Amino acid sequence: MQGELQRLVDALAVYAGRPALIEDRRQRVVVYSEHTGLMDDVRKASILRRQTTPEVMAWFRDVGIMDARTAVRTQASRELDLLPRVCVPIRHQDLLLGFVWFIDPDGTMADADITATGLMSELSLALYRENLLGELASQRESEAARTLLSDSEASRDQSVRTLREAGLIAGDGPATALVAQLVPLHGELPDEVARLALEQALVTTRRWIGTREALHLVRDDHGVLLLCGERGAGRPSPEVVAKLLDDNLRQATSGLGSVERVVVGVGQPRPRLTEAIASYVEALQSARVGVRLPALGPVVSWAGLGIYRVLSRMEGRHLDIADVHPGLERLLQEQPNPVLLQTLERYLDLAGNAHATAEQLRLHRTTLYYRLQRIEELADTDLKNGNERLCLHLALKLGRLTGAYRPQE
């Protein structure tokens, strides 16, 4: 089937007298002809990466290519380093299948060259068959990946058997889940272009580690990358993959105004792929904590969450600062002094080590002791009492997680 599409794109290029490139309806490169002559950076990147950047996708969609029934001429864009183009939508019985793209820098491409009716009819049928086969395979894999995250153990076992029989995974060895979370600028669900960027980053990362070494899935507000198989020589660790995924997410979303930042959560490894759901829950919780606490960084692992592991498990249950330490709640409400609160948190983070706290905060020891005494008075507490210190520390971390306490980092 790919050979048939290659024959058709080569014929289109000869007919039009210029290079041609075919994308599917999600603007992923399918095939392209030999390229000679003038090319812009967008075309070069599309050929090298076999995909268009979300920023360029959004630009073309604003022009109206998704609704077009006839050829669309697009203008140049200096910001995107984009030359003028002719975009011919490929449709089969009005179903959009993809696009044929020609670079037309001087606007000399004639309408007869654009339509090439016989070739376009052949192309629509060939791409329809290609899409049908590809969609079926993609749906089988997506459904199997989705089932791996279901509650039914029997369904998960069947899903692993299906994936192994189809040769889609290398093995049922250790599995680790990574969750890619987009943080929308206005707190809404990611839009279509942002979701495409999310999938693009997942696919790019998966190709880098090997398509049979991982599975990917896009959910409502996040993406999932399931790493599976034994760790052999040269195979990257989950931490390395998470860093690469973060880099790919940043690159894919860099030009999107709807995405504020990205967070990658990393779960703990599990012995078998059927147990990956536990790692997924951990990765999802890690990512959500990272969204609320930007100071944790762009990659947040379950193993490194510390007390936030416990607090994140209590999501949806009624627990506030006053439940943990009423005195700290009063201090937050009646005396919202960020200096005192930050001093207290640093002191508790350092296990009550006054010398280390004074050094890190660059304070004279007398000043530190004054602040700690003032905290004891305002919060009605005793910092020499281990139980009091534990409750205060836990209440501060809960305040960070809920947003009641927002220190200046």
Image (cartoon, grey):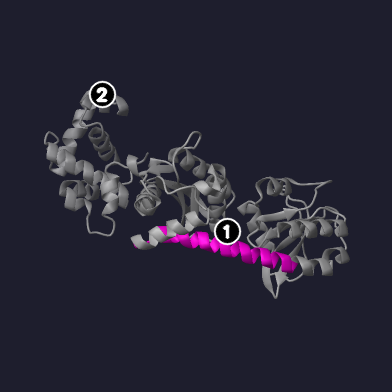
Residue 298 in percent (x, y) is at 44, 43
Q: Which residues are magenta?
A: 124-152
Query: Which residue occupies the foreground of this view, 302 or 163?
Result: 163
Q: Are marks 1 and 2 in contact (CB under 8 Å)?
A: no
Residue at the image position 44 percent from the left and 60 percent from the top: 146
Report whether residue 219 is seen.
Answer: no
Q: Main secondary structure of the magenta part?
A: helix
- 143 falls in the magenta region: yes
Foreground disc of the pair 1, 2: 1
The structure residue drawn at horizontal position 47% and vertical position 36%, both measured from the top left corner, is: 232
Q: Percent position (x, y) of residue 338?
A: 29, 41
Say the numbered circle drawn on residue 193.
1
Q: Counting other residues with Cα less than 10 Å from the Cα at mark 2, is it few (<14), some (14-19), or many (20 or more)?
A: few
Q: Looking at the figure, which quarter contains the C terminus? A: top left
Q: Quadrant of residue 377?
A: top left
The front one of 291 and 214 is 214
Judged from the image, the secondary structure of the residue bearing numbered disc 2 is loop
Q: Amino acid at mark 1?
A: Val
Which residue, given by chain and number where applicable, does mark 2 sit on? 364
At label 2, the amino acid type is His
Residue 21 in percent (x, y) is at 75, 55
Residue at the (57%, 57%) spot, across then down = 196
Q: Label 1: state its secondary structure.
A: helix
User: Which class describes the residues within 10 Å of circle 1: few (<14), some (14-19), or many (20+)?
Assistant: some
Q: Where is 76 relative to 394, above or below?
A: below
Q: Is residue 212 visible?
A: yes
Q: Is residue 220 left or right of residue 393?
A: right
Nearer the observer, 315 or 345: 315
Instruction: Determine if the magenta segment contains residue 402.
Output: no
Relative placement, left or right, of 1 versus 374 is right
